[in-house]
Image (tube, rainbow, N blue to C red):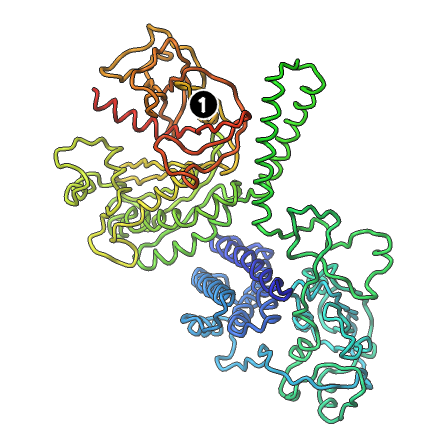
Amino acid sequence: MDPLAAIRETFFQECEEQLAELESGLLAMEGGDQDPETINAVFRAVHSIKGGAGAFQLEALIRFAHVFETALDEMRSGRVPITPDVLKTMLRAADVLADLVRAAHDGSETEHPLASGLVDELKAMSGQAADEDEAEEDWGDFEFQPMAAAVDMPEAPAGPAGFVVKFKPRGDLYAKANEAALLLRELARLGQTVVELDAHEVPPLTEIDPEAAYLAWTITISGDTDEIAIREVFEWVDGDCELEITKQGPADGGFDMASLLARVQDEAPAEDEGPAVVPANAGEVDVASLIANLSPAAAPEPEPAPAIAPPTLSVVASAPAPAAPDAAPEAQAAGGPRKSEAGATIRVDLDRVDRLIDLVGELVINQAVLAQRVMEAGLARASAVAMGLDELEQLTREIQDSVMAIRAQPVKSVFQRMPRLVREVAAMTGKPVRLVTEGEGTEVDKTVIERLADPLTHMIRNAIDHGLESPEKRAAAGKPAEGVVKLAAFHRSGRIVIEVSDDGGGINRERVKGIAIEKGLVAAEATLSDEEIDNLIFMPGFSTAAEVSDISGRGVGMDVVRRSIQALGGRINIVSKPGKGSTFTMSLPLTLAVLDGMVVSAHGQTLVAPITAIVETLQPKAEDVHSLGGHARVISIRGGFVPLIDVGMALGYRRDPLEATQGVALLIEGEGGSRAALLVDAIQGQRQVVIKSLEANYRQVPGVAAATILGDGRVALILDIDTIVTVSRGDMRKAS
């Protein structure tokens, strides 16, 4: 892969993080957060995106980000008040910025249709001139000409008291898509500055190392500022540059860059002198443009050499580049890490992490095989071999947990996409909506997170379009005009539960049943419970919309949600109260790779039941089992009755039911709190198993969620408990 392409990809990955921070900060401000640090974080997010875009000449992105950044700067300085209207404009600007970033990532540099209008709004808001010359942000196409490496510096007049900043970037600064010109521009905001360029280290063109940094600057700042404000400018590049800040009284300043530009135009450069970059239209270009072209901002990142290099991990970005030749040799000789490496992270190719997880899964299977062989050999548990295998089992479990933690990510990355969706759908429907999120830090496997976005999108659109009433109807019902959609995530029983709820009118069951009968989805004479009527909305082709719109009406959406959730090994159910709203609850596995299970047998077949669903096991007594007719039975447990389901019959292994007293009952709790008892022949033990997709390798089987490989090499099926219980309850209703 081209090193520059790798840096570009890293830039866009970091843009996603900055966009998430931008939106979360603006939403916090919309909720009343007036903390200056929140405003600064929002400003820094846009500033970082603009700075990186400059390194890759992303003109449309640079132009819009510049105007957006200026408006945010006016806000953080207090000149633009933080009002609801201003924040709405900022949120729309954040949406456009996100679109421009994604367009640039896809290789499209077309102007966003909403960008020009928002630019005018942002300029009017921040007091920028409508016809402001954008030349200072136009990096332009420059003509590269040889120039004298050193120019006689004119003496500058004495200046007032201030600070002298000596700034020398290292190669790391440019490798991370930072830009010296932006830092100098930020310093200029603090007061009057005089800049002196030190270019004496620039070698001949043939000897230039594109990964090194040769330029240095001495900046004299005068005005009402302090050292803390100066250091805040460099906080994003701390450790990636040499920085020295000294306070001084009235003294001679450095030379003015404008004078240097004027002299460059008048003096003919010598051909054998060291090269530098000079714009052909130097009289029309600002200082930032000159500095931007003097610095190797787009320097390719070198191939890193980590201290430990296992074949399954590879740092592809964010690793430190080689420092400049004179950068902290004492620290490097001592072998100590630089300050920037404290708490550092690395970016790893996801395919390599997946491969590592697969290998750990095979390690778990091989460990189980060894344990099985030792047991079959009849070795005592106190033997050295058995004790060694116990230690290996514990170590394998720790390795597996650690590797799975690498893929664990908070659901915040998905939740942060939803506010924009809510704003768009609310604008299209004309309904004021407020989104409330909870549990954004709940962690789940990355594979699950990646596949959550589509079902959540459908459900939130459905909640706003169908669930929430119009402002007029809400007012008539005594509700606030603003509807509330709540998105929550939490862990329960070893699974992740995500709830999407609204405070709307609930499901109109009469209308739902009528539409289902009209479309031929159910028989007109069918007797359906409230739960069954609610679940009709998941049927393909079902829609309650009166007409097709951009949001709904085509009969697709909720059926896609159910299929997506089922493909993840999850379940979805509905609780709706007329006049009060509806709650959709999705229950998903924390990971799609491993499972703690109870190994059981049914009619000679070995099966695995997810242990998170098992409440207890018991030996049924004859007096506790009651027949409902046919093969339907219930069992009495602590004064209550729960269905007794023969697993062997449910999966078609046998035709006649097992005598209850000859088997073992597993009391399980399904989604929604419903309970049932699964009757199996015997329990073989509890173990952690590696999940293998049955649908990908064979086909979907009702009542079976996946498969696994046991220690003796046999394939065992993992039970889909919720499906078994649902089907069996339907059979019981028919029997009764």
Q: Place residue 718 in its image quadrant.
A: top left
**In the drawing, does residue 135 fall left or right of residue 433?**
right
Dot 1: within a 10 Å radius of its alpha carbon, few (fewer than 14), some, or many (20 or more) residues? some
**In the drawing, does residue 564 fall left or right of residue 402?**
left
Please say if 98 is above or below 472: below
**Does residue 127 appear in the picture of this structure?**
yes
Q: Residue at x 50, y 57 (%)?
A: 23
- Which residue is under mark 1? 606
**In the drawing, does residue 75 fall left or right of residue 264?**
left
Q: Residue at x 83, y 66 (%)?
A: 326
Secondary structure beneath disc 1? strand
Q: Place residue 200 in its image quadrant.
A: bottom right
Please say if 421 is above or below 499: below
Give, as a three-letter code, the residue at label 1: Thr
Residue placed most toward the observer, 196 or 539: 539
**In the drawing, does residue 184 fall left or right of residue 708?**
right
Q: Residue furthest top?
A: 623
Please say if 84 is above or below 566: below
Name the spot of residue 89 as percent of width and height, x first.
44, 64
Name the spot of residue 266 as percent of width and height, x first.
73, 94
